[in-house]
Image (cartoon, rainbow, N blue to C red):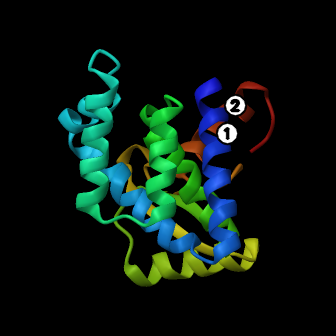
Amino acid sequence: MKKLAVARRYAKALLLIGKEDGQTDFYREELDSFSNLMDQNKELEQAICNPLYDAADRKKVLMAVIEKMDLSNVVKSFLVLLFNKGRIGFMQTINEFYQALADELKGVAKASLVSATALSSETIEKIRQALSKMTGKDVKLDVQQDTSLIGGIVTKIGDLVLDGSVKTQLLNMRESLKRGESV
């Protein structure tokens, strides 16, 4: 829980700087590329984050990576601050919060769409447009397939779940029959 609160606070701080200087999207790309590099290269992550290694050596590795990536001064300072405060290990979570906050700032909402069968791109686009109209935001859809749904789709956007799956309808019908209600 503490990790989430700390990560949110650092992400908000960087977002405020980005809003101030109009570089929110630029910082978003840099932070995401650094975070992905750390995520994809566990040895590098250990070399920077593992407290068993000497702090000065870990900082040298971090500085070499920052220089090689040619990051902006703001993101460079941000990463050094995270290292100095012992929060560089929270990079993945900080990045996730920053991405979500940057999307929110731009009026973009993320939604998931799970269907029993593969959907055509036209159908996916119609669903995306309907969700955009409903929320008043531009919606990014994460589309997945789950054959256990039997049929239909389940859409999640924020706290809202729209469940139109045959599996759920059958479960609801079963519960109604158990209670003796007419279907």
Q: Taking 103 as reference, is 16 left or right? A: right
In-front residue for pair 92/77: 77
> Is residue 11 in view from this perspective?
yes
Residue extending farthest to the top is 52
**Amino acid on which disc 1 is placed:** Asn
Residue 94: percent from left, percent from top: 53, 45
Residue highlighted by disc 1: 172
Distance (Cα) linking label 2 and label 1:
5 Å
In-front residue for pair 17/170: 17
Q: Are marks 2 and 1 in contact (CB under 8 Å)?
A: yes
Residue 47: percent from left, percent from top: 24, 31
The residue located at (31%, 47%) in the rendering is 63
> Is residue 164 in view from this perspective?
no
In-front residue for pair 73/88: 73
Find numbered disc 1 in the image and state the secondary structure of the residue it sits on.
helix
Residue 125: percent from left, percent from top: 50, 81
Residue 156: percent from left, percent from top: 61, 54
Q: Taking 148 as reference, is 180 left or right? A: right
Q: Which mark is residue 175?
A: 2
Does residue 112 lie above or below 120 as drawn?
above
**Amino acid on which disc 2 is placed:** Glu
The residue located at (74%, 45%) in the rendering is 183
